[in-house]
Amino acid sequence: MVYADIGLVERALQNLIENAIKYTEPKGKVTLSLIKMGKQIEINITDTGNGIPVSDQPFIFDRYKQVDSTTKKQGLGLGLAIVKKIMDLHDTTIVVLSKPYEGSSFIFKLPAYQLQ
């Protein structure tokens, strides 16, 4: 269990998982992992998709930004901007690790519920 707004975190996870599925080929893989790290839970969504060019990575959380303009993937470019706002509201950050043609990982941490 974590300290978080369940509705907002569900929305962030939905956006991240939908993007991972959208940009991963049919035989690719999308993985969601949760790891307890001290007083925090690390949430990691990883895909084996096309990855994000290094030059585009600083801008992926901007509104209306879509990295791959050549693809026929639909969307308004708001998903990651919404995720970023949700992370800001939870006073945490989200990190992207990505290499072209090797996939992407989106990682964030939330405080773990501590039994007293």
Image: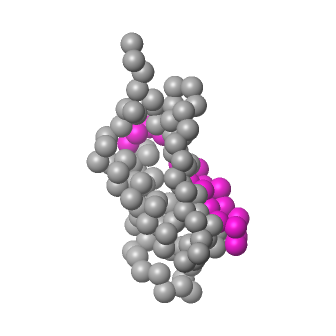
x, y (%) of residue 57?
Answer: 62, 63
Residue 99 colored in magenta in the image:
yes
Seen as rendered, the residue at the extreme front is 27
Compared to residue 31, the image places residue 42 above or below, namely above
Tell me the quarter of the picture where residue 36 sits: top right
The N terminus, quarter of image: top left
Residue closer to the observer: 22 or 65 = 22
Q: In the figure, is residue 98 to the left or right of 32? A: right
Percent across and percent down for residue 3 are 37, 32
- In front of the other: 70 or 65: 70
Check the picture and name the quadrant holding the C terminus.
top left
Q: Residue 88: x, y in percent?
A: 43, 44
Q: Can residue 61 be seen here?
A: yes
Q: Residue sitting at 39 percent across and 59 percent down?
A: 14
Kindly identify the residue that appears in the image at 51 percent across and 31 percent down. Answer: 40
Which residue appears farthest toward the left when viewing the image? 7
Q: Nearer the viewer, residue 56 or 48?
A: 48
Q: Is residue 74 toward the left or the right of residue 57 in the image?
A: left
Q: Which residue appears at 46% of the width and 36% of the height? A: 110
Give percent across and percent down for residue 101: 70, 72
Range shown magenta: 89-106
Assess whether residue 1 is covered by the magenta stretch.
no
